[in-house]
Each structure stands twice: as C-alpha cells, then as structure tokens.
Amino acid sequence: MVQIATGIGWAVSPDGIRPGTLPCQLLDHATGYLLAAGILTALARRARGGPATHVSVSLTRTATWLLDQPRRTPYPGTDGAHPNIDDYRVPLGDGWTGISPPGLLDGHPLHWPHLLPRYGQSSPTFPSD
C-alpha cells in the first residue's frame, strides 16, 4: 500500500490506470537495508568510543529517495515510457543476471562487485581474525 501511496506502484503502471507490480517488495527491502547500514554505522561509532546513536528509518522517506534516483537508460527494444524490469537488469557473469542496486555513491551508480558463488559452493563460516 505504501508503494502505491508514495508513487512507486504508479511509476511501474502498465497503463496509467492501475498501479503496477514490482518483482519484489522494493520499499521494504530498501528500508531494511538502510536500517541495517545505520545500525552497523552506529555500532562501529560506539565501538570506537563514540556516543550511542538512535537510528530510525521511514518507508515514505525511502520512497522519496528511491523516486529521486536517476532512471537508467532503457535497453533497446523497450519503449522507455515506463520503467521496465529489464531497465535495471545487469549481467553478473556465467549466464546470471541480477537487479542493479539503487542509488548513487559519490555521484556514481552502484554495482555488484562480483558474481556470487554458486548455490551450495560456499562454506557457512565467518573469516577469522
């Protein structure tokens, strides 16, 4: 409902009459990622002797941020009038594709640094220091 109320659902409307659907709960995921980043930043600051920090996020604030991001150039064969999932699909290698991360960092589009390991190929361990 918040995706529709904030305009995200309308940004992907197939006909301008009904809101469109996204391949994921974009707003929930992005807000969760921002919350996780804020918590990790606050914990790192506290571990270095800084003060405790309050972290809060807002679905509507995240929606505004997402909608303010520049649109990617549409791939050939798409009309460009409405965002298309293929506008955001990026090759990851080895025949895999993914959805590009939203936003910019220092004015540069974000990207995935490497292909994830194949399913079942990573050991469930943390690096030891």
Image (cartoon, rainbow, N blue to C red):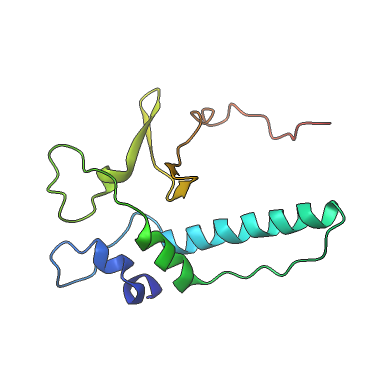
Identify the residue at image location x=16%, y=61%: 14
Where in the figure is residue 63, as x and y percent of width and height? 41, 67
Asked where in the image residue 78 lies, by quadrant, the reply is: top left
Side (left or right) of 39 relative to 35? right
Residue nearer the viewer, 60 or 48: 48
Residue nearer the viewer, 116 or 40: 40
Image height check: is 117 above or below 52?
above
Residue nearer the viewer, 107 or 110: 107
- Quarter of the figure that contains the C terminus: top right
Image height check: is 70 above or below 122?
below
Where in the figure is residue 17, as x and y percent of width and height? 14, 72
Visible residue check, residue 33: yes
Visible residue check, residue 20: no
Identify the residue at image location x=47%, y=65%: 62
Side (left or right) of 56 relative to 88? right
Identify the residue at image location x=39%, y=56%: 24
Where in the figure is residue 22, as x and y percent of width and height? 32, 58
Asked where in the image residue 1 lies, by quadrant, the reply is: bottom left
Identify the residue at image location x=65%, y=59%: 38
Direction front: furthest residue: 106
Where in the figure is residue 48, as x and y percent of width and height? 84, 51
Q: How many labels does the image show?
A: 0
Direction top: furthest residue: 94
Side (left or right) of 76 relative to 68? left
